[in-house]
Image (cartoon, rainbow, N blue to C red):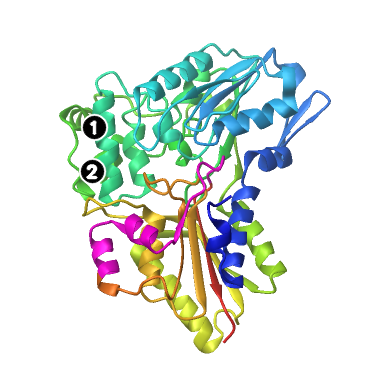
């Protein structure tokens, strides 16, 4: 999975850290997740704990988007075959499909082809009737891959807003609160467009807490956020946005634009959302590899968030405590965590949250500890690296490493230290996975 793996796995702890990462990412791939969570039994389609009688529908459509959307479509075709009558998904990682059209878009900054793909998704959804079963595929990255801005907001306006929000340190929940109110597909609006069809959301969560209203900005989920919430996010993080964006959101706070559909909207009476994979999918698989490697596994949390550098310091402290006192777990151990950290960008360097996390941790990692951290989609930030593998020897020059962090330039530093993890797109996205291997005391 990772380039130069043999060189990276230079010791048993390094090899174990990589194996845990690989197992977690593989477990979250749609070919495994869909095969486990979706099944066809005669004329009944099972999705998680729910069941749908296909005889009650005249057609089955697949629509949606996200980094893993094409892989999900492939897996659905393997199960349903010609029961799928058509559909369209938008992704930046295309696959060949037989019955579902795959449109390429871009991530993390939305593009014209993403807009065109989102329009195709909405057109397909709008043609659904009361005897249509819509399988709505939404995976990490859907927010950028399904932009669909409102008429008054241009794609350039949306790009600028997205970029500034990403640089501000805002959480994904906050970013999506803004994006929902600039879109005609997000915040439950896909479900409203598909009404009166039955909509079954097949969700791969890349957000802390697995809220369907946050995953992909919630196209099939009720939206609890308001224009006032979006306004507050921009103010809280001092995000300067184009005039068209500020004018729309301010007008929305005055009641001049309708809110996105909430929980009381009629369209949600025929909507079910199922989270098929999340951070725990990857963590559970990594935990089994740790056990097989005769290390005690400890799941620190699947919900780690906040500034990457600060979260990294906390992980270092856990490693130090393990080695000093055997708490919270006696070494040899593997400490696992998921979630999504953020970076408040102040420099103009190259990197991503996982790289900043790794380099920040490497400043103080104790001897006997190895840390691997990666975005499960294989792309950390806007770099070509998934993350990094570091230990106590990664930082021989603390001043240079700290300078790199100040300038948000972790990528070249880690590259020079042969610490980057490069996999390319993995076909899934369930947030970040971190593996901290702590050797015996």
Q: Please say whether residue 48 is visible from this viewpoint.
A: no
Q: What's the distance in space between the residues labelled 1 and 2, CA to CA?
A: 10 Å
Q: Does label 1 or label 2 sit earlier along the sequence?
A: 2
In the image shown, does 187 or 281 lie closer to the viewer?
281
Q: Which residues are magenta?
A: 400-429
Residue reaching furthest right?
42
**Relative horizontal placement of residue 262, taking residue 51 as reference (left or right):** left
- Foreground tag (1 vs 2): 2
**Relative horizontal placement of residue 19, taking residue 175 as reference (left or right):** right
In the image shown, does 251 or 328 lie closer to the viewer?
328
Q: Secondary structure at mark 2?
A: helix
Specify the quadrant of the image occupied by residue 254. top left
In the image shown, does 101 or 276 lie closer to the viewer?
101
Q: Does the residue at mark 1 contact the one at mark 2 (Cβ under 8 Å)?
A: yes
Q: Is residue 286 above or below residue 207?
A: below
- Residue 20, image x, y percentages: 61, 61
- Residue 213, image x, y percentages: 46, 39
Which numbered disc covers residue 234? 2
Mark 1 neighbour density, 10 Å: few (under 14) some (14–19) many (20 or more):
many
Residue 414 in magenta stretch: yes
Which numbered disc covers residue 249? 1
């Amino acid at each position: 999975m990772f380039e130069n793996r043999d060189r990276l796995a230079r010791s048993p702890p390094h090899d174990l850290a990589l194996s845990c990462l690989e197992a977690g990412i593989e477990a979250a791939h749609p070919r495994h997740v869909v095969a486990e969570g979706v099944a066809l039994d005669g004329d009944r389609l099972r999705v998680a704990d729910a069941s749908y009688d296909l005889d009650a529908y005249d057609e089955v459509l697949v629509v949606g988007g996200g980094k893993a959307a094409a892989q999900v479509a492939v897996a659905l075709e393997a199960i349903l075959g010609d029961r799928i009558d058509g559909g369209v998904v938008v992704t930046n990682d295309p696959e060949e499909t037989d019955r579902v059209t795959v449109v390429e878009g871009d991530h993390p900054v939305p593009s014209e082809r993403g807009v065109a793909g989102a329009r195709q998704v909405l057109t397909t959804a709008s043609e659904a009737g009361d005897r249509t079963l819509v399988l709505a595929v939404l995976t990490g990255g859907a927010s950028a891959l399904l932009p669909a801005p409102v008429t008054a907001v241009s794609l350039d306006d949306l790009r600028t807003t997205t970029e500034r929000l990403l640089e501000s340190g805002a959480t994904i929940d906050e970013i999506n609160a803004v994006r929902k109110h600039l879109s005609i597909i997000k915040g439950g609006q896909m479900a409203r467009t598909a009404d009166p069809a039955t909509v079954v959301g097949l969700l791969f969560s890349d957000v802390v807490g697995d809220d369907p209203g946050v995953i992909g900005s919630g196209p099939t989920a009720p939206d609890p956020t308001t224009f006032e919430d979006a306004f507050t996010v921009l103010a809280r993080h001092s995000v300067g946005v184009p005039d068209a964006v500020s004018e729309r959101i301010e007008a929305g706070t005055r009641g001049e634009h309708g809110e996105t559909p909430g929980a009381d909207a009629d369209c949600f009476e025929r909507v079910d959302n199922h989270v098929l994979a999340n951070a725990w999918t990857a963590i559970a698989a990594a935990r089994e590899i740790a056990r097989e490697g005769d290390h005690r596994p400890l799941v620190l949390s699947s919900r780690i968030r906040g500034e990457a550098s600060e979260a990294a310091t906390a992980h270092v402290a856990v490693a130090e405590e393990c080695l000093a006192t055997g708490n919270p777990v006696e070494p040899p151990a593997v400490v696992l965590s998921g979630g999504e950290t953020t970076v408040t960008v102040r420099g103009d360097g190259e990197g991503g949250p996982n790289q900043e996390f790794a380099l920040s941790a490497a400043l103080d990692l104790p001897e006997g500890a190895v840390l691997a951290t990666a975005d499960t989609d294989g792309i950390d930030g806007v770099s070509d690296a998934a993350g990094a593998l570091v230990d106590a020897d990664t930082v021989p020059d603390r001043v240079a490493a700290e300078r790199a962090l100040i300038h948000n330039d972790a990528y070249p530093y880690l590259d020079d230290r042969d610490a980057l993890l490069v996999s390319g797109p993995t076909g899934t996205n369930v947030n970040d996975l971190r593996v901290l291997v702590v050797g015996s005391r």
